[in-house]
Image (cartoon, helix red, strand yellow):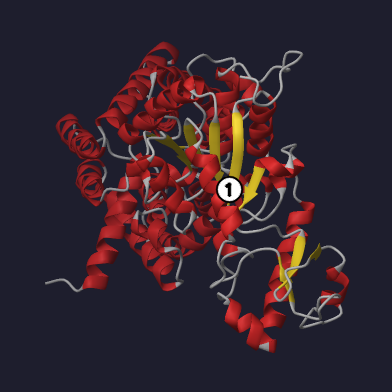
Amino acid sequence: MIAGPVREALRAWAAGWGQVFFSPSPTTGLCLVLGFSLLAPRAAAAGAVACAASTLVARARGYPRQPWRTGLYGYTGVLAGLYWGVLFEPSSVAWLILLAAGLVAAPLTRFAHRLLTRREIPTLALPVLALLWLAGVFLAPVAAVPPTAAGWQLAGWGIIAAGLALHSRLLVSAAVAGAGIGLAASAALEGRIEPGLISNSVATAMALGAVYLPYSAGSLVLGGLGAAMAGALWWAAAPAAAAGLPLLLAPFHAVTVAILGALGVRAIRRRLPGCPAPLPLESIETPERSRAVWQARHRLHALVRGARRIGVLTGAGVSTEAGLPDVRSAFGLWLEQRGITLDEFLTSTEARAEYWRQEESFFRLVRRAAPAAVHRALATFYRRGRLSAVVTQNVDGLHQAAGLPREAVIELHGNIHEARCVDCGHMVPRAPLSERIAAGSAALYCDGCQGLLKGGGLLFGEQVSPERLEAAVGAVLTADLCLVLGTSLTVTPASDLLRWARDAGVPIAIVNATPTAHDALAAVTVTAEVGATLLDLLEDAGLDSPAPAGVSPGSF
């Protein structure tokens, strides 16, 4: 029996192989190991070594567990090793440098993720390109790679295709389309098979046709166009690259990132009928799941078109687009280092000092933030008479800054722009307190009763006021659609609102970057970037143009 940590490491190692073709499945990864062993044994051995090194380094350094388990750190090692085996002359030095590359692959991938992923830019093959181009300075290129017999090639690619089909048949169909485009381009340009051209075409077709865009007719068209562009780019640059650094997967990377970036611009995307917006990187699953999301968007549009009084519940996901951290890592119900309860705040000088330090840090972020697309979209819905109220778990006041009147925003967890006396309840503006906090005050006191002041957001152990909860319940139960945006629904009473809405027969629609624990209560759930989804809803409902004269909230 293999010990638990070893078994988990082996699964992560196999998943790293699967990620070569956008699959986190260890079973798919093992099929790729076998297939590449038939196609290019030395390259497969190099990939195995580098993947093991990068997987173990990522675990030893304590990198996030989920990306590690799904092979996102091992993938760089696999791909670097596969290319290593066909680009460089085998020698003891080459193997030592490969091992060093495997050890560096995980930190390099982690750096690329932190730099690009939070900006919704996929890292793709960028870490691999950096490693291989650097290695090319020190290692001699291989003189010739002996051709693999046709029978072994057929068997190897057959096993790889079968393993990929175990993960997603739609992904296989995109890969086949990309291969067809690459083969056709090779035949048209030179009359012989060009592996570099085909590999770039296949990878681009898979990325755009089925992975980063929901699988649809529009995504397949874009995937095909991208595959042709990547192949043409490889062909055009190949002569110059022959005298310097090899192209490898650079055309795939450049074309994919460029097209995804263009689709992130709404003015461009709206000119492409039926073309969906790029999926949030953290929500990418199988193409089958992505297609289900795409279909859910259509059901969401139908619900919104038919609703005349929409009640909205928002969470931290609507403000992350404005540059604010998620509520779990910022001041609010949770504090960054540790949860400070209301009792601790009242009884501990150290807890109060820590509270005000973190509260001030978040307050500065909020003051610099401007309303994001989702805040502005909701304000437009309200001006056009389709929105009854917004119930929000956020304390940043960005809904009001976007143009929603105060009476239309119910702040369950308070507002950071205010401070409140815990004794008499007197509210004071928050901004003037910053100077006293900077001077080192561990406690701030009410001018009226000399009670302790605390920030406007709730702490652990502090209850939502009955008045706000009653207003939130009324806003949801009197709506004909409850639209939930950017919240994982992990805390009460916000999560209770959905159950009460369901019991009252109010349909629920949830839009969030990741699935929630309460998706089963919803008529439709959409796993997508919230701001882009709201802008598409505005356009679909015909609300993105100026309001006609005489239209005011509630007139519909």
Residue 220: x, y in percent?
A: 40, 20
Q: Quadrant of residue 425?
A: bottom right
Residue 341: x, y in percent?
A: 57, 77
The answer to whether any part of residue 122 appears in the image is no
Q: Is 60 located above or below residue 28 in the figure?
A: below
What residue is at 24 percent from the left and 30 percent from the top? 169
Q: Is 398 located above or below residue 529 in the figure?
A: below
What residue is at 35 percent from the left and 54 percent from the top? 70
Relative to residue 107, is residue 142 drawn left or right?
left
Q: Label 1: how many residues lie within 10 Å, few (<14), some (14-19) or many (20+)?
A: some
- Towards the viewer: 131 or 274: 274
Q: Is 435 located above or below residue 277 in the figure?
A: below
Residue 86: x, y in percent?
A: 37, 44
The answer to whether any part of residue 348 appears in the image is yes
Write down the residue under mark 1.
Answer: 471
Q: Quadrant of residue 346?
A: bottom right
User: Which secondary structure, mark 1?
Assistant: helix
What residue is at 38 percent from the left and 25 percent from the top? 295
Quadrant occupied by the N terminus: bottom left
Residue 8: x, y in percent?
A: 26, 65
Quadrant occupied by the C terminus: top right
At label 1, the amino acid type is: Ala
Q: Residue furthest left?
A: 1
- Towards the viewer: 518 or 119: 518
- Towards the viewer: 458 or 138: 458
Instruction: Say how many tags the image has.
Output: 1
- Towards the viewer: 46 or 392: 392
Q: Quadrant of residue 224?
A: top left
Relative to residue 244, is residue 49 drawn left or right?
left
What residue is at 27 percent from the left and 44 percent from the top? 40
